[in-house]
Image (cartoon, helix red, strand yellow):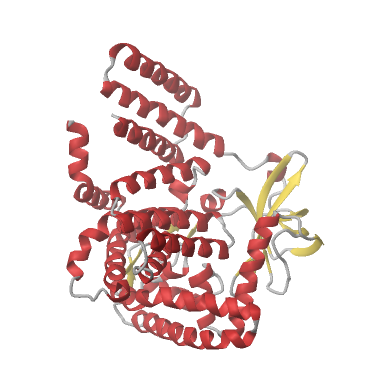
Amino acid sequence: MRDRVFYAICFGFAIGVFIRSFLSLNLYLIILLGIISFFLILFFVLVSRDNLGIIFSVFVLLFSLGVLRFHMADKSAPVVFESQVNKKVMFSGIIIDDPDKRENNQKLTVEIKEGEEKTKVLVTVSLDEVLKYGDEISFTGVLEKPENFITDQGKNFDYINYLRKDGIHYLMNYADIEVLSQNNGNLIKNALFFIKNKFLEKMNLAIHPPESLLMSGLILGEKSAFSEELRQSFIDTGTIHIVALSGFNITIVAEWVMKFFTFLPLNFGISMGILAISLFVLMTGAGSTGLRAGLMATLALIARATGRNYDVGRALILAGVAMISLNPFVLVFDVSFQLSFIATVAVIFFAPRVEKYFLWVPKTFGLRDIIAVTSAAYIFVLPFVVYKMGNLSLVALPANILILPLIPLTMFLGFLTSFFGVIWYGLSVPFGMISYWLLHYELFVVDFFSKLPFASFAIPDFPLMLTILIYAYFIYMLFGRSVKSWFLN
């Protein structure tokens, strides 16, 4: 009974948020539905004692709360700023995130305030501007609203909601900037970004481009400075996840660390894996994406290490619901959250079933586990990737198998390169040289497979219904017996 109520709470809330993400429902009707379901719970608990009635009423109540939670978060852009759209204006505000440096420019998330109203603007400036988190700036330019666009794969990218999930309603391209003051941000966040940038600086001294760009992506999720050609190569080979803050990528690193300490007690190995995750998240600046990925990876690691898939599976659902309650937009509009969640499900539940097909792979350094996890995650996320991104890579599996076993070692050496570089450049050189050749090999694999004529092709209209059916089959295959017993008992 407790399990049924738990799932009714979690799925009721998530489904409420999901439906409200697409449809604008009558708020008064939803409140009335929630009140009725609350009194029905009291009736079924105190009078009727009907378990099915309790579960259904709990589901409806949490569905109502899910709708209300999204409604509370779904705030329109402040009117005071709307009247200034498409006009040249001047604002002052504080940079609230680390500048996102790209190949030709950098993007700043700036919080501005006018009277009691405040909002966020994504400001694009040249790379010549020296700016950092916590700077108060004055900026002048034309205020614009984001617009959706068609990707290279022919998919419609919902850029409006992608930014809105982070509270960003406006853009300003190539603004004129003046720094008014510094160190206005959170002290802890400021320290984390300082460490991150110091690591990048020292690593770039010992490792040169393009290998340094790959290392930045591996240990810090910094893929924005990639050239368009290099980024497309990663997309075509299905390896873009290794330079993104995904729970899948971090899980592989943590598992490798845990395998390295197999000669010690199990709890120590798990602790070292979690420590590796924590360091990774801290090095990225502990942003929301990194925290989500870290949490997913920690849950997957505990499940794989202890074999307690059922308990950790429930923890995964609870963690997902907690993230959705904090920011309801992530459920539908945050691809990073969706991929992390799907990949973590694959690591926890699907990888153990796939592992029997890789008995021929030696267990040395956990190689069999890494290949099994890689294959399981790739198979599991493939339908979602094709539907969401419109890109099917036919070489992703061999490319990932050739690269991923070396990624944990590469990241570890990259960390040592940066760490010793902070102490003295000479200490970082040996680690930087080994890192360089590993990175060179990994880029060679990506380049080789991306140039094959059949590497990938676009599927812009992959049907949503087919995607749903595929995942319905996956769910039935993994949880069919549990679902049947859930309804029958």
User: What residue occupies the far right of the structure in this picture?
Assistant: 180
Q: Position of residue 7 (x, y in %)?
A: 33, 36
382 in relation to 78, above or below: below
* Screen quadrant of the C terminus: top left
User: Which residue appears farthest toward the top when viewing the image?
Assistant: 47
137 relative position to 334: left or right: right
**Residue 127 in the image, given as x and y percentages of width and height:** 68, 73
Q: Is residue 105 visible?
A: no
Query: Can residue 163 be seen from the camera position used here?
Result: yes
| Vertical arrangement, residue 209 with respect to residue 360, above or below | below
x then y, percent, for residue 157: 46, 57
Left or right, residue 100 beside residue 25:
right
Q: Quadrant of the N terminus?
A: top left
Residue drawn at 47 percent across, 70 percent down: 243
Query: In front here: 358 or 337?
Result: 358
Q: Is residue 187 left or right of residue 409?
A: right
- Quadrant of the rendered structure where residue 424 is? bottom right
* Number of numbered discs on residues: 0
Q: Residue at x 50, y 37 (%)?
A: 70
Q: Position of residue 199 (x, y in %)?
A: 61, 73
Determine the image quadrant of residue 190.
bottom right
Q: What residue do we see at 47% from left, 34% from top? A: 24
